[in-house]
Image (cartoon, rainbow, N blue to C red):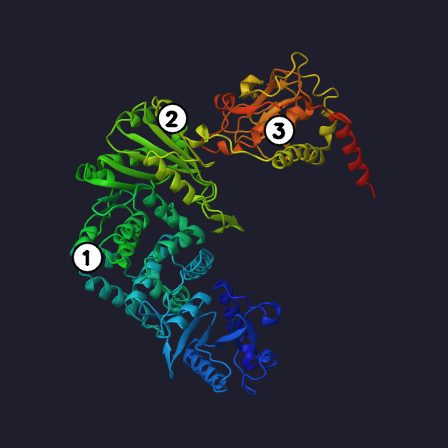
Amino acid sequence: MSKKRAESRTRYFIRTQSEKRRWNVSHISKGGDFVEEQEIINSFPSIGLGLEKPDFLVCFKGEPVMVIEAKNEAKKIDEAINQAIGYCETINATRKFNIKIAVGVAGEEDNGFFVKVKYLQGNTWKELKSNGYEISTIPSKKEIELAISANDGTTNVSVPSSAEFIDAAIELSKILRYAKIEAPLRPKVIGAIALGMYQGEIDTTTGKELDSLNKLIKDAIEESVDLRPDTKIKLEEALKLSGGDFSRLSSKIQRIISILKRLNIRSVLQTDTDFLGLFYEAFLRYGYDNNALGIVFTPRHMTRFCVDLICARLGDRVIDIASGTGGFLVAAFDEMMSKAKGPKAISKIKQSLYGFDTNPTVWALATLNMFFRGDGKSHIENGSCFDNKSEIEGKFTRAFLNPPFSQDEEPERDFIDVALDALEPGGLIAVVVKAGIFADDDNKVWRQKLVQNHSILGVISLPEDLFYPTAAPTSIFIAKAHIPQTESEKVFMGRIWNDGYVKLKGKRVECEGSQLEEILNAFENFKNNVKFKSDLATTISALKIIDGQEFSPQQWLPQPKITELELKKQEQTLILSLFQAVSSIPELADEVLEDFPENINDSEILPYGRKGVLTDFFVVANGKSSGEKNYSEGNCPYISSGDSTNSIIRLVSDDESEIFEEGAITVTAFGQAYVQPWRFMARGNGGSSVRVLLPKYKMSFNELLWFATQINIQKWRFFYGRMAIKSRLERLEIDCPKKEIKDTGNSVFERIDEFRNKLFELSEF
């Protein structure tokens, strides 16, 4: 096998990692940054190289800036970096170029790939460092710029992107799964190895890996001057990797280390970035079976956002009664430390953070996370907040919380109550919680009692995929403890649908257009009694919620303005859904009512230009049918709450008492409206119930489309936990067309019949 063929995997690793570090690995002639060995002399004839050339010459703004040399075995890393330096010196000897960055990359898939980076300062090649630790991955453009500017062998490490964290998390989870590490133990392994790497170099000699790692863990914990003696014992026990569960792990440790080094773990841990939190967010979210640990992980940008909303100040005493891996406490700690001046203030902050978690592994990760922040004194207890209620009542000024979701024995509202009780009068709480408790009837009495004892400052709706892959629409709840709500107060209602991340190919990755800052500014103005203007937020009178009515922003926010073009697209989507239904179920064409929609109502003319609620224009009825499985095959369309084929599941046998004979508009449980130009039956029981809108006025088909579109542009108001039940639809605000919208051309009946015939014609061969 040739040398270069053997190194092909390393070269592939270099390209993929460089792309993640924001380099363009295309040739410089194509606008990229890379030139590979055989292309170097053609691109730079005076570069001074002979027959031997480096694997990659990397350019910045068209000029060579970095040499990368690849080797096919991890043990050859020193050879790789030395050869890279040799190439740099050969090139620099021409005096036409001055390359200061040399990179060696060596490895293979089984043992991982390792990176060494050196910087030329004067005549000496030094390890390129950030925060006192070596850069251990291919430097980004920004890191190179800063290194050249400083010219002292240092740079400022770039925080890995969410994509880098996700890729590493998936790769690590795969390794641990193959090593037969049970899912609940996988986060512990990563935490243990991270602490070992933080303390020193893990000996990866065969047979010595676990002993070396456990010793480093023990040394790191024992050297802490902040951790209590009992905490040291529990933490070491929680992180120690011993016994049969980890017998197959030894051979994988070197590869795990290589992946964590790829994220510059040692350097990034020294910054104010919550490295461990960001990594666990990716690891627990995307690491296959890691949800077995039972954590609903609060994204780190949202923990920071909550801290910004209620301002963790110097002197605050902060608690999170369900702390998980410590995201809120880390965010509060960082915010308070940014304001601290002098060792006395810092020491006071370290005494002011408290938390609880019942899971020993999760508790260890939270304690470890605070340890990495330089705060070993945080009082994070491995226990239940419910068992310690009396010890924490009235002792704190700020509370943050993301309660466990959907636990029958301990519902979310109980956690909120305990957290509020832990605050002194006037203390503030920010809770990320499932949004259903602010809307459903089951929690109405609780909401009523809440405002009798505390004051709601605001509720902010969050993107529905925030906790992807967990399907959990959530909101941030902000309140002032032990000061009853007064009717004259205002309550802030906001909605965020872009938090700076978007779901793409099964992952949430960064995107432009984050609305966090706009909401934060609006809420800050609200707190200071300053008027604000935002399409994302409004204020309502506390009188509207004083009796336990909905706290949901979806109930109170006005509909954002929408362009005529978008309205037209929505209408076209509705029309298309009709033809998609006929394409899927051709027999539907036989069920279209020939005189639809003239048959529905031939009485009064629409009050054009009027604004109102849905009941001003329609009678809202519930579907009458049971589950579709209770019906045999037939010729009557059965409408459920699906969002495809016009919500039609199949054709079923008639039940005269359940049929809507004249067609109508149907609305799914999640607020999707469709026009039904045929008689139909609609589901009327359970969570997937359908609402049926029967016109009070004479309407054309285009006018029915108008009203269906008016509903669909407000689909954002409905979700699991706040479904489009009859009472909510009845008070939905909509506009009537400003003037009559006549139907032109063929009728719906004629168009669908023509479409069906065309389908049959095209299907003949």
Q: Nearer the viewer, residue 146 or 204?
A: 146
Residue positioned 40% across, 68% down in the render: 146
Q: Nearer the viewer, residue 281 or 111?
A: 281
| 3 horizontally vs 429: left or right | right
Q: Residue furthest top?
A: 603
The residue type indicated by label 1 comes to Gly
Query: Which quadrant of the view contains residue 541?
Result: top left
Q: Name the residue beneath numbered marker 2.
A: 442
Q: Name the residue beneath numbered marker 3.
A: 674
Other residues around mark 3 within 10 Å, as few (<14) / some (14–19) / many (≥20)? many
| 595 horizontally vs 29: left or right | right
Q: Percent position (x, y) of residue 169?
A: 43, 58
Mark 1 or mark 3: name the one nearer the start of the chain.
1
Q: CA distance from mark 2 to mark 1?
A: 50 Å
Q: Percent position (x, y) of residue 667?
A: 57, 27
Answer above or below: position of 708 versus 331: above
Other residues around mark 1 within 10 Å, as few (<14) / some (14–19) / many (≥20)? few
**Residue 265 — which label?**
none
Mark 2 or mark 1: name the one nearer the start of the chain.
1
Q: Name the residue beneath numbered marker 1.
A: 342
Mark 2 or mark 3: name the one nearer the start of the chain.
2
Q: Residue furthest front?
A: 530
Foreground disc of the pair 1, 3 = 1
Asked if one can make out residue 369 in the rendered structure from this viewpoint, the answer is yes
Asked if one can make out residue 407 in the rendered structure from this viewpoint, the answer is no
Q: CA distance from mark 2 to mark 3?
A: 30 Å
Residue positioned 60% across, 27% down in the render: 708
| 705 horizontally vs 189: left or right | right
Q: Percent position (x, y) of residue 74?
A: 43, 75
The residue type indicated by label 2 comes to Asp
Q: Percent position (x, y) of residue 636?
A: 67, 24
Give SS at disc 1: loop
